[in-house]
Image: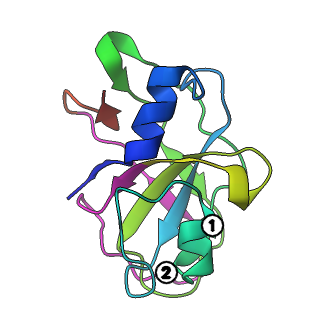
């Protein structure tokens, strides 16, 4: 059921999210605590539900948008422990969970679910035609 959040898609169309220039980050999510809804708008929806297992400390690098396809370099989140990870949420980091818009939800792919063991988690983005996602 990987898909884009409705408000994230809207923000792309309004020019409020730029994949290439904004600070785009990822959160590892426990779906036992957070239930996906395409209508959720900000990161607080996941955090307040207790769904956050870990998040990236820095934005994605090597982002591209060729032919409307979002891609980036594979990404590492260091020292991950906690609940089982069943999904990845992609968001624009503004400095506050309350104003950081959710962009995409990925709950299918190699390595999911994942039980963290305190080590690093490497997110290897799909090398297929749609990469991370396609608008």
User: Horizontal and vertical percent for residue 53?
Assistant: 56, 77
Q: Nearer the viewer, residue 100 or 86?
A: 100
Q: Which of the two discs, 1 and 2, labels the residue nearer the N terminus?
A: 1
Q: Quadrant of residue 78?
A: bottom right
Find disc 2 in the rendering and name its residue. Answer: 116
Please give left or right for residue 62 compared with residue 133 in the image.
right
Q: Mark 1 or mark 2, which is nearer to you?
A: 1
Badge count? 2
Please give left or right for residue 44 compared with residue 8 in the image: right
Where in the figure is residue 129, as x and y percent of width and height? 19, 27
In the image: residue 14, left or right of residue 4: right
26 relative to 67 in the view: left or right: right
Task: Tell me how far mark 1 sits from mark 2, CA to CA.
Answer: 22 Å
Q: Residue furthest right?
A: 95
**Residue at image point 77% right, 55% down:** 96
Q: Where is residue 63 drawn, in percent x and y?
A: 52, 25
- State yes or no: residue 109 in magenta: yes
Q: Residues within 10 Å of mark 2 (few under 14, many from 20)?
A: some
> Picture quarter containing residue 39?
bottom left
Q: Residue at x 36, y 12 (%)?
A: 66
């Amino acid at each position: 059921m990987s898909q884009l959040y409705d408000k994230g898609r809207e923000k792309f169309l309004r020019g409020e999210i730029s994949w290439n220039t904004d600070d785009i980050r990822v959160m590892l999510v426990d779906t036992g605590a957070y239930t996906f809804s395409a209508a959720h708008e900000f990161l607080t929806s996941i955090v307040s539900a207790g769904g956050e297992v870990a998040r990236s400390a820095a934005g994605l690098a090597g982002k591209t948008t060729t032919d409307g396809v979002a891609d980036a370099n594979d990404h590492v989140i260091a020292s991950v422990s906690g609940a089982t990870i069943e999904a990845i949420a992609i968001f624009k980091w503004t400095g506050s969970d309350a104003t950081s818009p959710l962009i995409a939800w990925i709950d299918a792919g190699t390595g999911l679910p994942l039980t963290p063991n305190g080590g690093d988690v490497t997110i290897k983005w799909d090398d297929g035609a749609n990469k991370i996602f396609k608008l």
